[in-house]
Image (tube, coloured by chain):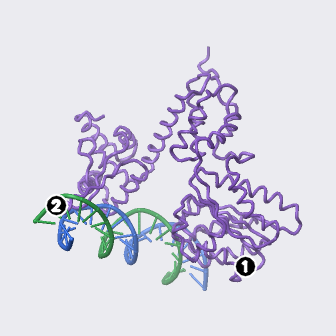
Chain colours: A purple, B blue, C green
Amino acid sequence: MGMFQRDRQVFADAEPLDDSYEPEDIRERDEELEKYKRALQPIIDNRPTSNIFLYGKTGTGKTVATKFMLSHLENDATEYDDVELSTVWVSCENLSSSYQVAVTLVNELRESKGKDRISTTGYSQQRVFDILYEELDEFGGTVVIVLDEIDNIGHSDDILYGLPRARSNGYVEDVRPVIVGISNDFQFRENLSPKVKDTLAEKEILFPPYDANQLRSILNPRAEKAFHDDVLNDDVVPLCAAFAAQDTGSARQAIRLLREAGELAQADDTEAVTEDHVRDAQDELEKNQLYEGMQELTTQGHAVLCALAYHQAIGEVPVRSRDLYQRYVKICERLDADNVSERRVRDHLSDMNMLGLISVYERNEGLSAGRYHEYELNVPLKAVLEVLLSTNRFEEPANIIQSAADDNNLL
DNA sequence: CATCCACAGGAAACGCTGGGCA
DNA sequence: TGCCCAGCGTTTCCTGTGGATG
């Protein structure tokens, strides 16, 4: 008997559970797709086309729907000799300004023509916009420009002002740009400057979160392809759907849950994926998210986390920010690191709150002690120590916290 | 019922980096 | 070579907040 034997396989083909998988039909979005189709129709008719904006939280099908519509549009456009169509896709995930979006867009356009990329720094914004118009003008007909996760650019929305007006302002002559903006943030619309709002809000399509029934209907065909027959217990898909619907209404979350449940079952070398696997998967994914969040903090973030962990270990929680800051400064001294201002530490704390790592309580004791926040860890102290111990420079304080926690029986 | 505490968090500005251009 | 550009992490400055208090 060898050391390795092939496990029982629960997966037939895990691809339908991958983030990058593109299903051949899109479920539970008939109304949205119909609206989307009507909005794009003028391109085929060679009529002026409005810009389109899609709103909805992550995992509500905006990106998938757009990929789906564009591939049909490109395909069908070839049927008409007088329809000239190109598409560009820019994911703004790591782009925080109009400037960066413009540079990425230029490089995307240049790449498709085999030209060299331009540098991401050094130019003035106007210079980049001029290059962008130049590149666009070399295309004829309609160019559909997809700006995915456009809410990342925040208030820097110049590009959303410039691009839609490029033609009417005479910056481009031969090309008709159509913007498809995709945003995870409903608020983004409100925060746009007024002059941008009316041109972009021409056609809006809202993608609401999925409910449990819809998620089931999305999961079922994928589950059928991904798993071997009779491997999934009947409750597995509904439970994944229910968990995801309760939490975010995100299809992505539901699919990840299903895959993780499958992987846990696989690791167990069992013949069936059960409800318990789904519950474990839910815990596992949640844990991973927090763990990653902690690991990706900066050194300063770790120092702040370390200070809070110390207070947790000696049982002095929740801590008000003033005391926490003093502790943080001491830790920095001990580590021979620079300390940042109190204001900046408040930002770090607010980031950690966003990640779900800590809890914040607002206190107000009037004129005796005023208004302040109190903080406490929202993850097990053990997990924080694990991360700190594995992070360079933090072994020593982590060990001190560890023994303090041992003394107080807090582990 | 106005007062006032003690901080929260917005805004601006700074210093530095990496790059273009004449 | 020297000046210009945008952006990031941060500091500095300051206004806003809401309930116990007198």
Residue neighbourhood size for the residue with mark 1, other residues' Cα within 10 Å, grouped as few (<14), some (14–19), many (≥20)? many
Q: Nearer the viewer, residue A212 or A221?
A: A212
- Amino acid type for the residue under numbered disc 1: Val
Residue A234 placement, left or right of A384: right
Residue A131 vertical placement versus A321 (above, below):
below
Residue neighbourhood size for the residue with mark 2, other residues' Cα within 10 Å, grouped as few (<14), some (14–19), many (≥20)? few
Q: Where is residue A35 shown, x and y percent of the image?
A: 71, 60
Residue A384 placement, left or right of A258: left
Q: Which residue is mark 1?
A: A172
Q: Where is residue A245 shown, x and y percent of the image?
A: 55, 43
Residue A229 vertical placement versus A405 (above, below):
above
Residue A13 vertical placement versus A306 (above, below):
above
Say which element carries label 2.
helix
Q: Which residue is mark 2?
A: A368
Q: Where is residue B6 shown, x and y percent of the image?
A: 22, 62
For marks 2 and 1, give the CA distance.
65 Å
Q: Nearer the viewer, residue A347 or A297?
A: A347
- Amino acid type for the residue under numbered disc 2: Ser
Name the residue at 50% across, 33% down: A279
Subunit under mark 1: A
